[in-house]
Image: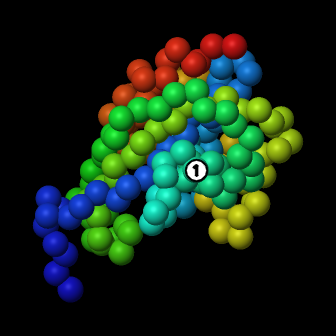
């Protein structure tokens, strides 16, 4: 099967959440499928779903809780998949993702976080990190997007 030219493929719509705790640190989790790669919760938007409810759904699915209040949001941000992943990720239908990112304050406790809440967990470990640390933890092709998120949400990275 011939893979479409990446530039001809659309972007997958998604959301991401920078979840800040009371100390101004942000939630990061290590992916099960990519050991050593840490990221913030993120995922696709279902058909007829609005972005903020999608973000809360993703939190619930990925970390077992949606105890969060909205602080802010970005415009739509994009990243492209590396050429070797186009045609393999998302059944080859997308060239990357277009995501709306949300900053949210975590209103629960660490004991509310359960990486195995979903039957198909995505993460193996989690921790609270300084916002500025995130770009170095993410896979390189997502780094420019994470730099934009860090800049957009810097004001929320305080107690």
Q: Work out whether residue 71 or residue 114 is closer to the camera in this orientation and state it.
A: 71
75 lies above or below 81: above
The residue positioned 69% from the left and 13% from the top of the image is 159
The residue positioned 38% from the left and 69% from the top of the image is 90
The residue positioned 74% from the left and 48% from the top of the image is 65
Question: Is residue 36 among the parts visible in the rendering?
Answer: no
Q: Position of residue 146 (x, y in %)?
A: 41, 34
The residue positioned 36% from the left and 75% from the top of the image is 91
158 lies above or below 83: above
Relative to 51, 20 lies left or right:
right
Residue 40 sits in quarter = top right
Q: Position of residue 20 (x, y in %)?
A: 65, 28
Relative to 89, 32 lies left or right:
right
Relative to 6, 118 lies left or right:
right
Q: Secondary structure at mark 1?
A: helix
Question: Is residue 117 among the parts visible in the rendering?
Answer: yes
Can you identify the residue that label 1 sits on? 53
Q: Position of residue 1 (x, y in %)?
A: 21, 86
Q: Position of residue 154 (x, y in %)?
A: 49, 18
* Extreme-bottom residue of the structure: 1
């Amino acid at each position: 099967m011939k893979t479409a030219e990446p530039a001809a493929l659309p972007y997958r719509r998604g959301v991401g959440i920078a979840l800040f705790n009371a100390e101004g640190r942000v939630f990061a989790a290590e992916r099960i499928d990519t050991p050593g790669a840490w990221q913030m919760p993120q995922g696709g938007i279902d058909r007829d779903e609005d972005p903020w409810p999608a973000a809360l759904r993703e939190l619930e699915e990925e970390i077992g809780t949606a105890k969060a209040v909205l602080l802010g949001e970005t415009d739509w941000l994009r990243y492209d998949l590396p050429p070797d992943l186009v045609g393999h990720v998302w059944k080859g239908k997308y060239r990357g993702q277009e995501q709306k990112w949300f900053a949210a304050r975590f209103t629960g406790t660490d004991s509310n976080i359960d990486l195995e809440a979903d039957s198909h967990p995505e993460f193996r470990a989690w921790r609270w990190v300084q916002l500025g640390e995130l770009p170095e933890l993410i896979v390189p092709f997502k780094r420019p997007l994470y730099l934009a998120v860090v800049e957009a949400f810097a004001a929320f990275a305080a107690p």
